[in-house]
Image: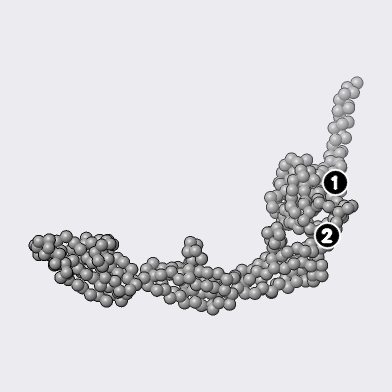
Amino acid sequence: MKNPIWQRLAQCALLLTVLLSFGCSSFVLTSTPTAEVYENNTKVGQTPYSFSIVSGRRSLTLKRFGYVEQPIEVTALDPKQLHFDLQWVGRTHVETQPPGATVYSKDSMKKLGTTPCGLTLSRGESVVIKKEGYETVERELDPNMRYMVKLKSTAGYKSVSYKDIQFTSSQGSVHIYDRIAGERIGITPVRLYLETGSALEYRLAGFKSRYDLVSRNAPMRVNIELEPLTRVTFTGPPGASIYRAGGIEKIGDVPVTLEVTGDTLCEVKKDGFYDRTVALAPGSPSRMSVELEKIPYKTIVTEPTGAEVYRLGGIEKLGLTPYTAVVKEERVFEIKKEGYRTSLIGMGPTSAENLNVPLLQAAGQSPDAAAIGELDSLVIESF
């Protein structure tokens, strides 16, 4: 008599063989590019990925950094070769009417942006959109899609009118700023949904900024034309530098080109020359040559050195030789050194920059004779 337990085991083995022969389906999952395969948030492999289904279905997800996650539901009736082309993660654009609403993640209530905004989503996201005076809206966002959400004002809240405007410019990519918030809100060509009364500023390098106000009767298309800035090129003595008014902030060395946005003052400086102030304004000539006046430095050199230099009269001592002074007009100096005769030196603006004065030794005399000798001092003229 056979053992009933062994009979049961044999029947189960037979049933399992039948199920594996007829009810098991094998699949191969591939993707471009290759990606990791997840099941129940656990990594189970990487494409190409082989797996089987005995019955029911399997839920898998393909993940790769920089690409949109690809969820997959596979049943035994699906094709045995499964291939998916993954999408790059782009921008999910969210706009609202009116703009300025805040977008939050529904799960964490983390702020994602303020409309109009572009979100970077690798998978679907549930969001909450809020704006003061308007009803809260919930939305399901899919990656790389564009959404326009119209908000309803709450009871008792004063409604504000908005204008849908397309901005263009033939001069290049003009930057559009909200003057109140101080933020850039677009670059041409761009379509903006703006509250009436909004103050705008248009900016473009090389052009004068322009201001605009969004009115209730503003056109649907605005072509921005800006006035070119006045550009002035400074030339002058080699080594001269250009400073902003006040002489602290250096702009550059000549030749240098400036963009003139309004009335302004510049200072031109060079060592050994007097500073010069130059006024600029829109419409100034495109080239400006600046001449600087040389400072008339004169140096008195004696042999031997170390002689004392006085103003005429011999009372106010100015320094010791070699002595340098600014001589704007004719001046007379007295040169004194113990043991040498006093010399009178006349100099003017056209005198040589360096005047060599040989000192003559004084003869041995009494104080009275020495005083008389000073009246007979050597006079060297250099006018």
* Image position, residue 351 (x, y; %): 28, 75
For image coordinates 21% across by 73% down, the residue present is 380
* Image position, residue 258 (x, y; %): 54, 70
The colour scheme is: one colour
Disc ID at residue 76:
1
- Left or right, 381 with reference to 90: left
Q: Write down the quadrant of residue 264 in the picture.
A: bottom right
* Image position, residue 57 (x, y; %): 84, 43
SS class, disc 2: loop
For image coordinates 79% across by 71% down, the residue present is 219
Residue to which mark 2 is pinned: 160
Q: Write down the quadrant of residue 335 in the picture.
A: bottom left
Say which of 304 and 88 sits in front.
304
Q: Write down the quadrant of residue 188 in the picture.
A: bottom right
What is the CA distance from the residue labelled 2 to the residue labelled 1?
A: 57 Å
- Left or right, 279 with reference to 339: right
Amino acid, disc 2: Val
Image vertical order of residue 358 relative to residue 183, above or below: below
Say which of 81 and 112 sits in front.
112
- Left or right, 89 with reference to 208: right
